[in-house]
Image (cartoon, rainbow, N blue to C red):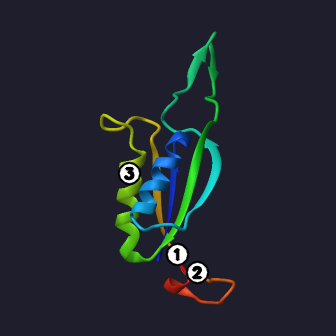
Amino acid sequence: MKLITAIIQEDKLDMVREALIEAEITRITVSRVSGHGQQRENEIYRGKKIVPNLIPKTRIDIAVNDEFVEIAVNTIIKAAKSPGGGQVGDGKIFIRPLEDCIRIRTEERGGNAI
């Protein structure tokens, strides 16, 4: 089991969500977050270094069984990437091992709970 976390541009959420549904991945968690990466360098304004503002982004968390990891990752990349080969600020995907998952209602554990 893996936990996939994707940080994407806000306006790409609907496209990513629809693409995931087509790939039969329907259980996702979405959060509004903010941060900055490479899309803005430190700027000098009137001789002072300016720290870049935080940029609104969308965070998607998906718990998947191992056989769905590549499907989910490739689907997110295709839907979130800007036309023309992508651009700075398209986002990042993190994949972490998921030790356990428990469905509270039925107390199922592991891959069955996902």
Identify residue type, mark 3.
Answer: Ile
Judging from the image, what secondary structure is the residue with disc 2 in?
loop
Q: CA distance from mark 3 to mark 2?
A: 25 Å
Identify residue type, mark 1.
Answer: Leu
Q: In the image, which disc is placed on residue 56?
A: none
Q: CA distance from mark 2 to mark 1?
A: 8 Å
Residue 99, x across and y down, in percent: 54, 80
- According to the picture, the residue beneath numbered tag 3 turns out to be 77
- According to the picture, the residue beneath numbered tag 1 turns out to be 98
Residue 27, x across and y down, in percent: 54, 68
Q: CA distance from mark 1 to mark 3?
A: 21 Å
Q: Pick whichever, 24 or 43, lies toward us.
A: 24
Name of the residue lying farthest toward the top: 46
Residue at x 35% of width, y 50% of height:
78
Q: Nearer the viewer, mark 1 or mark 3?
A: 3
Judging from the image, what secondary structure is the residue with disc 3 in?
helix
Dot 2 and dot 1 residues touching (CB under 8 Å): yes
Dot 3 and dot 2 residues touching (CB under 8 Å): no
How crowded pointer 3 is (Cα within 10 Å; few <14, some 14-19, many 20+) is rated as: some
Dot 1 and dot 3 residues touching (CB under 8 Å): no
Judging from the image, what secondary structure is the residue with disc 1 in?
loop
Q: Which of the two discs, 3 and 2, labels the residue nearer the N terminus?
A: 3
Residue at x 55% of width, y 62% of height:
61
Query: Does residue 42 appear left or right of residue 22 in this picture?
Result: right
Residue 64, x across and y down, in percent: 47, 72
Residue 19, x across and y down, in percent: 42, 55
Residue at x 39% of width, y 60% of height:
73
Identify residue type, mark 2.
Answer: Cys
- According to the picture, the residue beneath numbered tag 2 turns out to be 101
How crowded pointer 2 is (Cα within 10 Å; few <14, some 14-19, many 20+) is rated as: some
